[in-house]
Image (cartoon, rainbow, N blue to C red):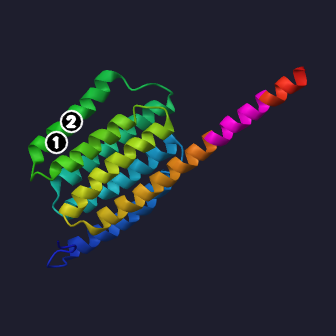
Amino acid sequence: MKIFPDVMTTSYIISQVLGFVSLIILCVGYFLNKDKLLFTQILGNGINAVAYFLLLSFVGGIGSILCTIRCLIFYLYDKKNKKIPTNVFCLIILIFVACVCITWQGYYDIFLISCYLLFTISLMFKDELLIKILLVVALVLSITYNVIIMNVFGYIRNVTELVSVIIAIVEILVKRKKMKHEWLFNLCSYSILLQ
């Protein structure tokens, strides 16, 4: 299995540098709350779109543009503390599916579109733990796609994002366990005081 293409073109090198920049932005976002996560996703996906177009991956490029728009829509609704209407959510899903149908290049595109759809679905939830668990699956799909199209920084970025998300999940679980123990401790203390 080849990791790098036979010829290192300027566009390939630039795409990999952009991939590295988006790596930093996206990984930082996974440790932030949902609003800030969405903002870093807007920026990171915009950079990814350019990187994918430089690799001539039209599904990746157009998909990243759609991800940028999707995150902007979710960000604006979250800022207003409003839930995304079902029709807007369904429209976003349909646009992703149409994108794949129009730009289909091979069987491997199904991995990336599945990643985009799963990430979109995850953003409908308020529970940060559930969002991040769904992101794990989405990132595995994206890693698979990037390995197939030989996007080195794409899969390095996705593996790093995956590790970041797993660490963020552990942090959430530890925090929840600590809160559960504090609640139990407070309850026991209160019952002792009542006696």
Residue 30, placed above or below residue 51: above
Residue type for callout 1: Cys
Q: Which residue is mark 1?
A: 99
**Residue density around tag 1, few if under 14, some if 14–19, many if 20 or more, within 10 Å:** some
Find the distance from the CA under tag 2 to the CA under tag 1: 6 Å
Residue 152, position as x, y percentages in the image: 28, 68
Residue type for callout 2: Ile
Q: Which residue is mark 2?
A: 95
**Residue density around tag 2, few if under 14, some if 14–19, many if 20 or more, within 10 Å:** few
- The one nearer the camera, 189 or 99, is 189
Callout 2: SS: helix
In the rendered structure, which segment of residues is drawn in magenta?
177-187
Q: Residue furthest bottom?
A: 7
Seen at 24% across and 57% down, the residue is 144
Seen at 83% across and 26% down, the residue is 190
Picture quarter with the C terminus:
top right
Q: Is residue 167 left or right of residue 100?
A: right
Residue 162, position as x, y percentages in the image: 40, 55
Q: Quadrant of residue 148?
A: bottom left
Callout 1: SS: helix
